[in-house]
Amino acid sequence: MAEVYEPTEHEISIGIAIIKQVVQNRSHPLDVIREALSNSCAREVSASYFGITIFYDGTYGWSFIFEDDGIGMNYTSAREPEKQGRLDRFLNLAYSGVAGLKSDEFGFKGLGSKLMYLCKRLDVETKTENGESYKVIVEDPISKLLKQEKPEMPKPILYKNFPVSFQHGTVIRVYGYDGGIKHSEYEDAEKLKRHLYFRTLIGYSRHERLRDGFPKIIIKTPSIPDGEELKVGFPWIKKEGDHVEGQKIGVINPPITVSKEDKKGNKVTMTFKGGYALRTGEFGMSDYGILESKGVGLTYGWKGIPYFNLDFNHYKPQGFELYYKFCRFVVECDDVETDIARSRIVSDGIKEPLFTAALREAYRKVMETEDYKEWVKYRRDLKRKDLGETLNQRKDDLQKREQKWVFYSKELIHKEPNNEQDVRVLLWKLEGMKALPFHYFRTLEHTAQKGIDVIAEYQEKDFSEKKLYQAVEVEHILENYADHDHVPEQTSLIIAWDSKNRDRLTKVEGEWKYVWEYDAGNNLNVILLKYLSNIEVKTR
């Protein structure tokens, strides 16, 4: 006869509002992996192995398995935090020094494991080295916390002395994480590994701790079915080894440590590490923006674990000639407060200003190094050479017999446009000559960054209404408008050089003014400069 294991309902000793806040304030869907790594790879767990499996479950959707061969988690059911076992604290709060308790190496406010409640089913099997074993099941915590009108506390069901298939350690199955939806990293191995190395313990950055070693870490996903070992250690830019042609590298060696203290005794110490490269592709440095690029710019590290990007330009002093896209810097600091998701430094008015002052001083110390001075000189020389070659090539192209030019009333005004920038120049020249087909046209503002190109005011005829602060988009070829993610309802006028499909436009006046029926009934007014009555395109 099979043995029956009597279940016990564990009452979570933490407010529901706190749990809900934790699961809603993650900075990235893979934060749950980050926390699992930090929990299982701490010294106190004594694991020699940690496994991560990402898989699709037919019932629950995309899911995780985290397993280690460490000391396991004991359970006491005690209400007092200081008497609770590791499993109690895993399910509750206060598994950190914040509560006055001895925390694990990478413990942070006891919040990390709560991210695992963002799933359809949570299963935990654990066995201690002295044979104490448990199984915990939490059914549909995501719905209880987030999908009901009134949030409900998840109810872990605990089975004591439950038989497990391993000697000691813990296996955690997170079924249907984030509702079971797929995130691109699950099937994109390179994107996943990039995230792990620049946002988790896999990219650990403190050399002294690395010498002591971490568990062997194996990851399995649909794109890595046989598993792959991930070596712990930040992917530093290094001078050693062969490099691509034209490469120039600088490194911060030794690391720069700076401390700042105020009159009230508040103190912040930070360590600045890393390197910079001219040919960034060699190190897989892809630029997605100053705060979004993983492994590019300036990364904040807490207890050796990289967490998020800082604004590189906010800290660099005047005259610092390295741009974020060339750099892979890490600033390690355990003395400042971060938000609950560890996605930014809290502006507390106390330690954050000290951190800022220390980091800016570290930047200035980088400027004093020989590597920096040599790198800057090399790049300046290379840039002068490249600009000279480019300038000469542009001149040669303009002198070719087949080069076409734009004339207005037989007066040469510009080469024939082959890009949007040329069209803007042509537009403004024609505006200055009062040669645009408007009774009145004036550019008020232009942006090259985001959104519609120009804000202008214009009047089509002497009897027409004067239109103020109108959004005018400039394109080389009219149809390029569709590739630039503009909002037609926010576009008053498009001025383009030409159109690929002029016959599909509705002609309004001459050969130059049209209406374009765009995107389900939006009618856009169009001016094609190439067909203005006094414009002629020809070779010289």
Image: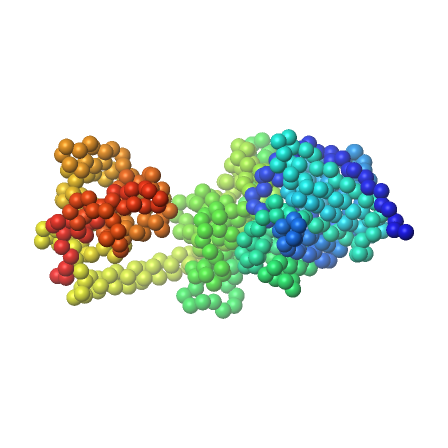
Asked if residue 143 can be seen in this view, the reply is yes
As drawn, is 15 to the left or to the right of 342? right
231 in relation to 332, above or below: below
Instruction: Classify the position of the C terminus by image quarter.
Output: bottom left
Q: Who's the residue at 58% across and 48% down the image?
A: 181
Residue 119 position, x and y percent, is 65, 44
Residue 216 position, x and y percent, is 69, 59
As drawn, is 244 to the left or to the right of 143? left
In terms of depth relative to the viewer, which is nearer, 231 or 3? Answer: 3
Q: Who's the residue at 54% across and 39% down the image?
A: 345
Q: Who's the residue at 42% across and 68% down the image?
A: 245
Colour scheme in use: rainbow
Residue 100 position, x and y percent, is 72, 36
Asked if residue 256 can be seen in this view, the reply is no
In terms of depth relative to the viewer, which is nearer, 54 or 14? Answer: 54
* Image quadrant in which you'd find residue 520: top left
* Image quadrant in which you'd find residue 155: top right
In terms of depth relative to the viewer, which is nearer, 93 or 153? Answer: 153
As drawn, is 13 to the left or to the right of 200? right
181 in relation to 150, above or below: below
